[in-house]
Image (cartoon, coloured by chain):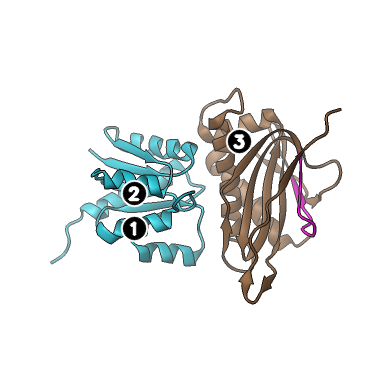
Chain colours: A cyan, B brown
Amino acid sequence: MQKVLIVDDSRTMRNIQKNVLTKLYPECQMTEAGDGLEALTVLASGSTFDLILADWNMPNMDGFRMVCKIREKDKTTPIIMVTTEAEKPRIIEAIKAGVNNYCIKPFTPDVLGEKIKQTLDRARAPVAT
Amino acid sequence: MDVNYINPFIMSSRKVFDLMIKVPLTIGKPHLRNDEDGKYAVSAVIGLGGAVTGCVILGFSQRVALALAGGLAGTPFTSVDNDCVDALGEIVNMIAGHAKTELPGGLSTLSVPNVITGEHRVQYPTGIPPIVIPCQTQAGPFAIEVAIQKTPSANGVAAAAPSAVPVKAKAS
């Protein structure tokens, strides 16, 4: 069973992502946050997730700052940035901050679905020793 | 009218409509805004800053606003309620956000989108001539207004994005 945190200030966009997740993982438990600050509050309460989907441009705390804060303590929870920020410097910045995958808006459900599967498969893959 | 600042919005709109709104879109010839333009029942507004300064507005009739919001959300709307407003904000966010990737000059940033309801006409800061991109859907026409320019910089610091000032039409 997957537990996913969806962070986006648009309820419409959160619903679209929830629909993609439900089709892929019908048993998925989804938690929503409207901005980076709300997401950090959820995480600080002790909730853990198998995946975080994060928008970039949000009020109160943007997704990039949120990712930096998360990665201060949690280096392993996979994070996919789902955003309109598509310029190469932005993508590189996000990956350096610890984002595992990137989905550019607008997207089809299939594209987001593939990125989610890719990211979770990589997270589960055994590390070579 | 510098096409390098307009074409990205045309391409971006097509992409957003194709991939997410799934409503057929026909785009007309862009023109400088005239006195007949700019009167809407609903507008979705977003500001740009950084390498370019200005704002982008999607202006609709209520009928078209409901149809496009419903296309994105996947559920029909019967009134411009909070969920409809949210969907319209996301549409302008995606159109402007995707377009800015192709704008000349470097990185730009977006404001949080706003949606204005009630008959109004948007006015702009002096000096940025708005370009209107007329669009047509099965639900009716709408317009994309692009009022952006390369950011004039002083001492290497880019100016902040000005906001569009919505002005209600006078009651007749």
Does A42 sit above or below residue A126? Answer: above
Q: Chain of mark 3?
A: B
Q: Three-letter amino acid code at disc 3?
A: Val
State which quarter of the image contains the C terminus of chain A: bottom left
Measuring 26% from the left and 33% from the top, which residue is drawn there?
Answer: A27
B128 displayed left or right of B139: right
Residue B128 inside the magenta-drawn segment:
yes
Quadrant of res B139: top right
Q: Three-letter amino acid code at disc 2?
A: Leu
> Looking at the picture, do discs 2 and 3 lie on one chain?
no
Q: Which residues are magenta?
A: B121-133
> Looking at the picture, do discs 3 and 1 lie on one chain?
no
Q: Three-letter amino acid code at disc 1?
A: Lys
Residue annotated with mark 1 = A69
Comparing marks 2 and 3, which lies closer to the viewer? Answer: 2
Residue B20, percent across and down? 53, 41
Measuring 72% from the left and 38% from the top, which residue is drawn there?
Answer: B142
Which structural element holds mark 1? helix
Residue A40 is labelled as 2
A92 displayed left or right of B84: left
Residue neighbourhood size for the residue with mark 2, other residues' Cα within 10 Å, grouped as few (<14), some (14–19), many (≥20): some
Q: Chain of mark 1?
A: A
Residue B124, percent across and down? 76, 51
For the residues bearing labels 1 and 2, Cβ distance under 8 angstroms = yes
Query: What residue occupies the far left of the structure in this picture?
Result: A129
Residue annotated with mark 3 = B23
Which structural element holds mark 3? loop
Q: Chain of mark 2?
A: A
